[in-house]
Amino acid sequence: MTIGRPPGNAITIDGTRFRDRAGRHIILRGVNFGGDCKVPFTPDGHSYLPSDFADHRMVSFIGRPAPLDEIDGHLARIAHWGFNCLRLLTTWEAVEHEAPGRYDEAYLDYYAQVCRRAGAHGLHVFIDFHQDVWSRMSGGDGAPGWTFEAAGLDFTTFDAADAALVMQAKYDQRAGGRQAAYPVMSWGGNYRMPANGIMWTLFFAGADFAPGALVDGVNIQHWLQDHYRGAMRAVAERVADIDMVIGFDTLNEPGTGYIGHALDAPLTRLFGQAWSPLDGLAVAAGMPREVPLLKFGGAPGGSRRMNPGGVPIWLPGRDDPFRANGAWDIDRSGQAIAVRPDYFERVGDRTVSMERDYMVPFFNRVADTVRAVKDDWLIFAEVDPFGAMRGEGFPPGCPDRTVNASHWYDLAALVTKRFDPAQSVDVMTGKVRAGPAEIEAGYTKGLGQIRAIGEALNGGAPTLIGECGIPYDMNEAEAYRRWAAGDRDPAIWAAHATALDLMYNALDSLLLSSTQWNYTVSNRNDAMIGDGWNQEDLSIWSADQVTDAADPDSGGRALTGFCRPFAQAVQGAIVSQHFDSAAGRFELLYDADPAIRSPTLIFVPGAIASCVVEANGVRLDPIAPGDRTIRIPPQSGTVKCLLHLAKAAPFI
């Protein structure tokens, strides 16, 4: 028994492993809490509701992820399902929406209470300053509205100018469902559209590419980053005394803007609108522009005329700082021309690197900010998610004790909201995989590339997949229709459970920690609503599926796909773990460290009917009814544990 609690972080890193205070190898398996933290609670900011964002300075995020009088029930359920970690969302807007330097003190108090209650349920917390495509006003979430004003942009013109695809402007709530005006999973294309292209370039590289863009006498890059880090520090100061807060994410899925791209080259070659930086800057200036369209895989798919009304997005009296610095201009015929085609690719004689020149310095500034409050916090770092999925990693110079927190999804399932266990397409390579075994092998390969990034980070760092998961409204939301018709057969979730089983098999085989996306308290089985943001619907729980308020499993979606055995804490170093869902057999192999006197802990789902446990061929005492943790007493040498699990219905 450990007497007292040693000082320092509840979780530390040892090369590529996480360890707890007892020295055990820890697998952090958690969930993002929650998907609707992207939008205000008051007034209701769910993105299917129309808004002109006129009230952006007066919103409140208190109540996201859940009101305090409801939150313990959700946290208890998350822990009941075996999760031991939360990637707990907040946003820059939630903290500093009113004005630069004015923090929402009541929200900060609320957020600290959420962290405390999570810790009381045994959940480690790392704080995610979340964003998607910069801000709610540019089709996503994250930054306050006043950041656009500081940059000289008028977000009220974005929809009319085709500078961003904004659901609040495009979607007709009265009609509901899916609508052609707002295509499924279209929000990600905003990264390539003008509002995002401009803001991300200014945020990361304004000093290099817009040296004349000053706010209060400071270049806009430094001004924006200083305020972002100020909001992080405000949160850090509120949670510094909470033992189970283990660190901070740097910034969710950061955009790269125009940095490193030729002015006249498309920003994507995969699918969607193939904007070039010149297209974006011309449209921002109020010029109509024909933009190519690409089908999946990059085949030409026609074009679309953007900003046909010629609406500029710059505020009156404000000019494009890139044009002012000689990047592009308008010729005598009124056409946009690239004066310096390599403008965003070079600074002086140096070819720029987004990661080396801008991300690594940003990571270090974030680390300095939060570690000035508590110096043993971990840094969960993210680069461009598509770059990570291509195996592009972190350059030298990252802060010490940095975790590779890159994301991974089956992009075909995510974007198309379809999954067929018989066949899957890898969007990154175009390869077709036939059958579950090939699909799982593809998942393992993709996740293995991300693990390799961590192995190269700072000479070897842990990888925690910060986001992974599936849409629950996939395959035309067939499961919802069957549920609404009264069908309670677990088979309605068969495709979902299989996809999750294959994903977690891959995570297990690579010994990766992860936080699944997501758990959303306001989720509904409704194509209009989903997680309440841009028609995403990846929540593992929905109030619409609660049939017994006393049953913590009630409301869970495809529960058998993610609520499964895994090694939570191991006395030594894990060699391998594997769960055969069809046979109900879990195997764990580890090298025990006799200096560690704490037991190995294995989570098992609470719904099992029986569990037989063996360690090196010796049968252990059965676990008590309702117990979800198997404890293997301290061992020596190499230990092989077998669990034979049985339940009333198949696991998958």
Image (spheres, helix red, strand yellow):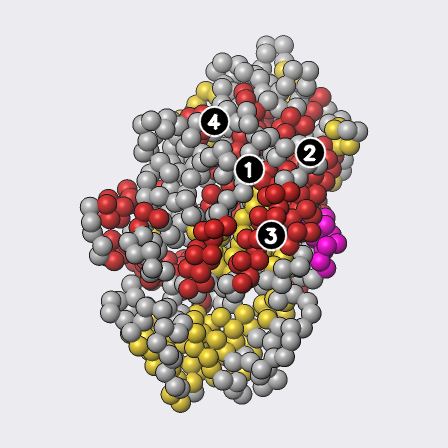
Mark found first going from the N terminus, 3 or 1: 1
**Mark 2 Cα-neighbour bin, 10 Å: few <14, some 14–19, many ≥20:** some
Res 490 → quadrant: bottom left
Q: How far across and down, in percent of the image, does residue 33 sit?
A: 49, 51
Does residue 185 appear left or right of residue 570 in this picture? left
The kind of secondary structure element at disc 3 is: helix
Q: Which residue is mark 1?
A: 60
Gap in angstroms between the C-alphas marked 2 and 3: 22 Å
Q: How many marks?
A: 4
Image depth: mark 2 or mark 1 in front: 1
Question: Could you tell me which secondary element the residue under label 1 belongs to?
Answer: loop
* Residue topped by disc 4: 51
Location of the C terminus (image quadrant):
bottom left
Magenta part of the protein: which range? 364-375
> Magenta: predominant secondary structure element?
helix
Asked which secondary structure carries label 2, the reply is: loop
Residue 193 at least partly seen? no
Q: Identify the mark nearer the N-term, 2 or 3.
A: 2
Task: Tell which circle, 2 or 4, labels the residue nearer the N-terminal end.
Answer: 4
Q: Residue at x 35, y 76 (%)?
A: 625
Instruction: Measure how far apart labels 2 and 1 are at the Cα level.
Output: 16 Å
Which of the two discs, 4 and 1, labels the residue nearer the N terminus?
A: 4
Say what amino acid the circle numbered 4 marks: Ser
* Percent coordinates x, y for residue 23 in the rendering: 61, 75
Q: Give me the disc on residue 112.
A: 3
Magenta span contains residue 67: no
